[in-house]
């Protein structure tokens, strides 16, 4: 293409930017006229598209030529197709309308006979990676990956192409449909293919831990053949290490799964790890070999820590790591420290790590800042009650010299460690005061707030804290945060030390005043409050305090002025009730998660691959694991609920023999009627929610991992309005939300979306923590037995659509109004209804809660009242018994209903008798009460 | 005051480095290069860059960077005045002031820099004076040529008129006055004037003997309003000539230049922002607005001015631009000249912008001039070498557009004009008289020439 080279040479020759722009404009005009000619041939088209590409790469806007690029893609010549795909991937944006044509061409090329063309197509998909491609072409790519005819070359490209799409549009590729089929490729004989698939599986394993579960066994097998059986070709040996990248990827992949259950797999895995560790005992000469070997070794150690199956291995790892952290290589030191903090996060006994404490402290002074950072992480992770004092004092000593970038994190960590492992009060106060003085500039307000909270919460601390505070204020230099803490503490507890020498109220006030002038506005505001509190605490120095306040009444800062004026007014007020009330001692702060912790965790960056652990002690990692496995099991339950494949899911657990019997059981949660209680704990929980809503109008109906459903109801028998609230509890947005309700029998109950609300009220997507709501109007036409069902469908990013079926707490009992009648009337009706005999429902219910105290009876009363009965006082001779009257209103008629509840605390039983003018009403309300009892 | 002066070439290599004070090191030259010259072109360079406590003032000329360095709070206006004077010195010494000239004469440049700045304070920067003792000739020849006595140099450099020697003699005493105006205009698409102003410059070349005292009169509104009788002075002075093109149609100023198309229809002009050469006695100007001065020898810029009222626009442009769908744009541009038929505009260039996706232009011009599509500038360029007054010409064009992938509306940049009109002043300014008084009372001949150029003359479409 001579024209292209000439053009590029021309542009290179241009001396100034203006010249270049002129040349580009000229060429653009030329290309525009050329593209208008109908008879342009493929060669010229290719040439001009290349020129456009070059201009676009130089930063000029190219607003035409996309059509020509697409035409090139359709060409049969390889070189033209190549340029076409290149242009398409560089010039097109994701929403371009031409992409549709490109997708068509891609689909055709994907099934082309020539593998070169297939490769071009795969490359183009990876480069463009639009949503539409992910939706339309994923299946074709999977076919290429699985096809026995495709060459290794194509398989590799296909796997990597899928990886790109999975990363970009996890929800569009529907990975759960094909992930099972590609898992066996981890055992493919070609190492290149395995390596590509391993990358893909690592990405998928983070999203679909359940579906990819089998990958673990394949990975183990593959590792075994690679490490122990030495099955590899010479092409893949890198400086005497067989396929290091594949080994690392497989070891990493395995960290996303729990340890294998079968002892055979465990021992295989152990022998692999041991082999890797053994091999690394001899230090290689060559740098590259060392790098490869060490990376494998570190990954192996990480896996070993993650599996946590062999104590001996762990101790050995600790020894190895101890050697690494003293290594001369900076990278090895870094990795050693990082891996050791991983180890510290899981290992039960920290002794093996504590042996290296001196070395680690030394690393805080390393030349390399990232090594220093890791050393800090490790010290933080390995801290426990025994070594807390040593570590904290080391960190404090180091704080003065530490980099500014590191200081904030260091200060936070010191604060957390001190609080967590403090055994003596004095030590805590001393350390914290030193900390705020040393690093006050580098940390947020959380630290000093926390100190105050802790001091307020621990009475034993207060006297000592007061002494220290006064000392701090009297010291020649006092950091601002330290000043704030001291001022606050003295204001609260100054009276505790008022009788000690040199701590008289006047001394305290003077110390405060001496530092006040040199601090910022926010600190002065705290000090003013303290002065206000002094007026209350020490009436003897009231005039002095008022003088201080008076000086600030004219302060320019609005906050200071307001405080001074208000406190001054309080101090000079006649009568002495208000002042003590306002300045009453602060109550201890309620226990909550330390703000420090949340701040520290927020600092964790979001990287490409999820880490399987976080920096910190064992507790936090344990918690994390618990949450993760909980989420996994919950996912699987939902997958079963989605009833996409209930039978295989059941047969997996129950075995082939139990398959037929297990199937209905898997369906049970969806179809379970109100009377039978499934044993699944989460279903039991939702049953409890349901039962609660039988006697309360508002509340939570369903509380899952991803969604939370709340109900708010208002009844005006025979009608009512029900509001359904859908909250997103997942961390990703929900899509395709649908909320519908259906009555079991439309002739008895009418339920439909409330009039006057637009359909758009359900948003297309629901952000995490956001809420959507829908209202339904219900009309009770006749007495009905079964509650209506609520269907909530949604899609979470990266998984199949989920449909949850819930029972809406709408029963005939809800359409009941309380009626007050006299005692005599009640018994007359009771007898009358009892004689007919048909419309009676009686249950004897176990009620253990009654034995405890009177609260049980109270609860019982509120349940009966909440169900719409008017309670009639003193009707029954037995004072504990409850009787009530209500009328259920339907469009077909009104039905009176009487209830009598006879609790027998001595036996832990309650008899509930219902009599109504309609048998169905009595039965329905009876079963409602029964359910409420059962779920109590 | 100034601590150093540097001259760089385009690449940022230091050509001249002269330090005047000890508060900066020679290496500050690198600081400026790194922070200003080498910074990417996309960054807008401020003429004043302050790095730490050091300020760098720079101007660019041709392929040179002139940079002055000050440590203290120097007056920026003064520093730039100094830099431009330095530039003027260079031009007058070397003809062209560029890298080549600096490299060939760097001894002379250092000599000049020694002379014009002392301990960072600017000294005498008059070309004429400097040329007395800072000469381009070699050392040997200067010894042979009778050098002016040091005493006379001192007299000259410290006397009342530092800009003129007192021993100048001409056989024929002549003075040429050029009034050069550039007119700036922005016209809206509907034809209303959004901005119109004239920036003028009066350049004088004097070849007068002795120490002549000159008086100069314009049709300044303030003067004329105050003294309506002053018009008669013109008749008395009577010896002013007007030079149009070549050959100059010698015409007395007394006729009030009646033949000069656009100039001087008796109106007075409101002049704003006058700025004079240092030879003009400002005290006199402030009291009675008379411009009196002893001119330097040779060419100098007597004054600059600006007017914003009553601007005579030399051309009217009536553009009609229609975008027909997305495939084509139609142009109809009509230009009328708005000055006397006896005058003519030369070197006229009309640049009519086209959309960035234009492919083919079919252009028809009825009237003088030729037009063609110039894709490099995305414009139709219409050149008219000579355009008489009170004439009109028009252009129609149809521009085909290529389809765009992402249709973006055309920004419709304005049409711009470039031209020169002799013997026409857009402001209406007129030289009423120039009187020369000398002790020997010789007769002098005076010539006046007017020219109007286009500044940024833009019509929105």
Image (cartoon, coloured by chain):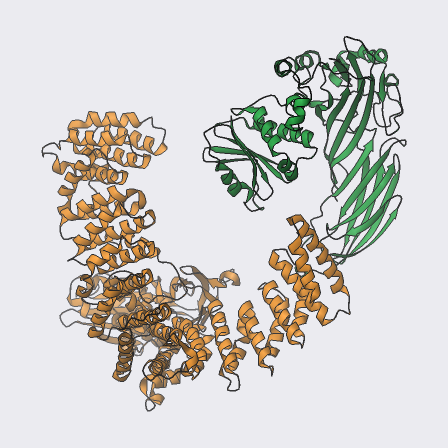
Chain colours: A orange, B green
| Above or below: residue A581 compared with residue B214 | below
Quadrant containing the N terminus of chain A in the rendered view: bottom right
State left or right for residue A536 relative to residue A621: left
Specify the quadrant of the image occupied by residue A477: top left
Image coords of residue A498 (percent x, y): 12, 34
| Above or below: residue B440 compared with residue A346 | above
| Above or below: residue A360 compared with residue A211 | above
Quadrant containing the C terminus of chain A in the rendered view: bottom left
Q: Nearer the viewer, residue B314 or A707?
A: B314
Q: Residue at x 76, y 61 (%)?
A: A33
Q: Nearer the viewer, residue A25 or A802?
A: A25
- Whether residue A587 appears in this view of the structure is no
Q: Residue at x 85, y 11 (%)?
A: B236
Q: Nearer the viewer, residue B343 or A916?
A: B343
Residue lying at the far bottom in this picture: please name it: A657
Q: Residue at x 50, y 33 (%)?
A: B55
- Whether residue A394 appears in this view of the structure is yes
Image coords of residue A490 (percent x, y): 19, 37
Q: Nearer the viewer, residue A29 or A499?
A: A29
- Give the tally of numbered discs: 0
Image coords of residue B458 (percent x, y): 74, 39
| Above or below: residue A883 compared with residue B125 | below
Specify the quadrant of the image occupied by residue A237: bottom left
Image coords of residue A685 (percent x, y): 30, 70
């Amino acid at each position: 293409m001579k024209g292209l080279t000439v053009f590029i040479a021309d542009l290179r020759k241009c001396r100034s930017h203006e010249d270049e722009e002129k040349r580009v404009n000229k060429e653009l005009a030329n290309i525009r006229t050329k593209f208008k000619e109908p008879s342009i041939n493929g060669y010229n088209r290719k040439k001009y598209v290349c020129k456009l590409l070059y201009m676009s790469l130089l930063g000029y806007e190219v607003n035409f030529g996309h059509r020509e690029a697409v035409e090139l893609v359709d060409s049969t010549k390889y070189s033209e197709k190549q340029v076409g795909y290149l242009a398409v991937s560089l010039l097109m944006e994701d929403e371009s309308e031409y992409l549709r044509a490109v997708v068509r061409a891609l689909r055709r090329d994907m099934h082309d006979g020539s593998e070169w063309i297939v490769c071009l197509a795969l490359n183009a998909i990876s480069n463009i990676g639009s949503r539409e491609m992910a939706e339309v072409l994923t299946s074709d790519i999977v076919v290429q990956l699985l096809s026995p005819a495709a060459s290794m070359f194509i398989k590799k490209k296909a796997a990597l192409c899928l990886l790109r799409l999975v990363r970009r549009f996890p929800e569009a590729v529907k990975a759960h449909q094909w992930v099972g089929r590609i898992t066996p490729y981890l055992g493919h004989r070609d190492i290149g293919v395995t390596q590509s698939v391993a990358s893909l599986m690592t990405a998928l394993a983070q999203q679909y831990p359940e579906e990819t579960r089998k990958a673990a066994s394949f990975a183990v097998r593959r590792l075994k053949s690679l490490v122990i059986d030495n099955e590899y070709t010479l092409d893949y040996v890198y400086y005497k290490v067989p396929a290091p990248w594949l080994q690392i990827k497989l070891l990493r992949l395995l960290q996303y799964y729990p340890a294998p259950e079968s002892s055979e797999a465990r021992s295989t895995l152990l022998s692999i790890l041991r082999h890797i560790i053994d091999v690394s005992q001899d230090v290689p000469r060559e740098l590259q070999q060392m790098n490869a070997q060490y990376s494998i070794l570190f990954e192996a150690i990480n896996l070993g820590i993650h599996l946590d199956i062999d104590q001996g291995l762990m101790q050995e790892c600790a020894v190895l790591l101890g050697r690494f952290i003293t290594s001369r290589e900076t990278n090895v030191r870094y990795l050693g420290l990082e891996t050791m903090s991983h180890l510290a996060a899981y290992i039960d006994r920290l002794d093996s790590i504590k042996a290296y404490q001196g070395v680690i402290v030394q690393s805080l002074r390393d030349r390399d800042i990232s090594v220093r950072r890791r050393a800090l992480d490790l010290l933080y992770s390995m801290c426990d009650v025994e070594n807390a004092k040593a570590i904290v004092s080391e960190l404090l000593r180091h704080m003065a010299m530490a980099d500014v970038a590191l200081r904030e994190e260091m200060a936070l960590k010191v604060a957390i460690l001190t609080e967590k492992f403090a055994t003596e009060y004095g030590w805590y106060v001393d350390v914290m005061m030193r900390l705020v003085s040393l690093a006050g500039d580098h940390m947020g307000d959380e630290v000093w707030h926390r100190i105050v909270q802790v001091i307020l919460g621990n009475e034993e601390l207060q006297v000592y804290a007061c002494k220290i505070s006064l000392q701090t204020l009297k010291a020649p230099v006092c950091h601002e945060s330290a000043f704030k803490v001291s001022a606050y503490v003295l204001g609260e507890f100054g009276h505790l030390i008022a009788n000690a020498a040199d701590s008289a109220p006047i001394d305290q006030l003077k110390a405060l005043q001496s530092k006040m002038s040199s601090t910022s506005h926010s600190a002065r505001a705290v000090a003013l409050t303290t002065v206000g509190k002094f007026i209350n605490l020490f009436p003897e120095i009231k005039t002095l305090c008022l003088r201080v306040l008076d000086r600030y009444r004219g302060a320019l800062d609005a906050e200071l002025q307001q405080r001074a004026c208000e406190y001054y007014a309080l101090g000079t007020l006649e009568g002495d009730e208000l002042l003590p009330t306002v300045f009453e001692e602060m109550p201890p702060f309620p226990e909550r998660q330390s703000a420090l912790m949340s701040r520290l965790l927020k600092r964790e960056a979001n990287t490409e691959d999820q880490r399987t652990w976080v920096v910190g002690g064992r507790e936090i990692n344990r918690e994390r694991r618990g949450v993760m496995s909980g989420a996994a099991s919950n996912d699987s339950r939902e997958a079963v609920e989605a009833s996409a494949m209930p039978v295989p899911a059941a047969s997996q657990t129950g075995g082939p023999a139990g398959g037929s019997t297990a199937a209905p059981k898997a369906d049970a949660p969806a179809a379970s009627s109100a009377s039978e209680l499934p044993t699944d704990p989460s279903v039991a929980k939702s049953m409890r929610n349901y039962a609660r809503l039988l006697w309360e109008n508002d509340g939570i109906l369903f509380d899952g991992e991803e969604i939370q459903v709340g109900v708010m109801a208002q009844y005006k028998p025979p009608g009512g309005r029900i509001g359904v609230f859908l909250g997103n509890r997942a961390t990703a947005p929900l899509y395709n939300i649908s909320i519908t309700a259906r009555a079991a029998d439309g002739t008895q109950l009418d339920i439909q979306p409330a009039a006057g609300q637009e359909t758009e009220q359900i948003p297309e997507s629901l952000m995490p923590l956001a809420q959507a709501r829908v209202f339904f109007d219900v009309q009770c036409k006749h007495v009905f037995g079964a509650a209506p069902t609520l269907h909530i469908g949604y899609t979470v990013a990266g998984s199949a659509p989920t449909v949850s079926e819930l029972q809406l707490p709408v029963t005939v009992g809800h359409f009941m109004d309380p009626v007050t009648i006299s005692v005599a009337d009640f018994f007359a009706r009771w007898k009358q209804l009892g004689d007919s005999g048909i419309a009676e429902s009686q249950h004897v219910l176990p009620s253990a809660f009654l034995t405890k105290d009177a609260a049980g009876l109270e609860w019982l009363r509120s349940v009966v009242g909440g169900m719409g009965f008017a309670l009639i006082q003193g009707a029954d001779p037995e004072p504990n018994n409850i009787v009530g009257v209500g009328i259920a209103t339907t469009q077909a008629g009104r039905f009176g209903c009487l209830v009598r509840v006879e609790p027998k605390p001595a036996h832990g039983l309650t008899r509930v008798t219902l009599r109504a003018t309609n048998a169905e009403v009595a039965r329905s309300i009876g079963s409602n009460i029964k359910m409420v009892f059962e779920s109590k | 005051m100034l601590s150093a002066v540097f001259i760089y070439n385009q690449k940022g290599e230091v050509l001249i480095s002269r330090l005047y004070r000890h508060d900066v090191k020679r290496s500050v030259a690198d600081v400026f290069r790194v922070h200003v010259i080498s910074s990417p072109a996309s960054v807008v360079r401020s003429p004043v860059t302050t790095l730490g406590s050091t300020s760098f003032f720079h101007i660019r000329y041709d392929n040179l960077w002139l940079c002055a360095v000050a440590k203290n709070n120097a007056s920026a206006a003064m520093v730039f005045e100094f830099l431009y004077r330095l530039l003027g010195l260079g031009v007058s010494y070397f003809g062209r002031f560029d890298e080549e000239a600096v490299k060939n004469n760097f001894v002379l440049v250092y000599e000049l820099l020694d002379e014009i700045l002392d301990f960072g304070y600017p000294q005498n920067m008059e070309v004429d004076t400097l040329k007395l003792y800072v000469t381009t000739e070699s050392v040997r020849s200067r010894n042979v040529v009778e050098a002016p006595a040091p005493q006379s140099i001192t007299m000259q450099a410290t006397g009342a008129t530092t800009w003129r020697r007192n021993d100048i003699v001409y056989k024929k005493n002549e003075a040429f006055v050029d009034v050069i105006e550039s007119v700036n205009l922005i016209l809206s698409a509907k034809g209303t004037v959004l901005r119109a102003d004239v920036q003028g410059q009066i350049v004088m070349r004097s070849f007068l003997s002795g120490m002549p005292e000159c008086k100069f009169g314009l049709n300044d509104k303030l003067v004329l309003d105050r003294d309506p009788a002053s018009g008669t002075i013109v008749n008395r002075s009577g010896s002013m000539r007007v030079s149009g093109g070549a050959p100059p149609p010698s015409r007395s100023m007394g006729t009030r230049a009646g033949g000069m198309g656009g100039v001087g229809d008796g109106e007075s002009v409101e002049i704003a922002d006058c700025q004079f050469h240092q030879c003009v006695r400002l005290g006199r100007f402030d009291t009675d607005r008379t411009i009196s001065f002893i001119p330097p020898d040779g060419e100098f810029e007597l004054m600059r001015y600006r007017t914003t009222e009553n601007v005579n626009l030399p051309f009217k442009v009536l553009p009609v631009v229609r975008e027909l769908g997305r495939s084509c744009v139609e142009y109809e541009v009509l230009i009328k000249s708005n000055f006397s038929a006896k005058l003519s505009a030369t070197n006229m260039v009309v640049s009519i912008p086209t959309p960035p996706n234009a492919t083919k232009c079919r252009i028809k011009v009825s009237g003088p001039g030729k037009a063609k599509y110039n894709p490099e500038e995305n414009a139709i360029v219409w050149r008219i070498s000579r355009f008489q007054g009170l004439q009109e010409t028009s252009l129609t064009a149809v521009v085909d557009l290529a389809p765009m992938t992402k249709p973006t509306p055309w920004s419709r940049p304005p049409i711009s004009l470039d031209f020169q009109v002799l013997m026409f002043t857009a402001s209406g300014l007129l030289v009423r008289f120039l009187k020369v008084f000398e002790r020997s009372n010789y007769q002098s001949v005076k010539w006046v020439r007017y020219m109007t150029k286009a500044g940024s003359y833009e019509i929105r479409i």
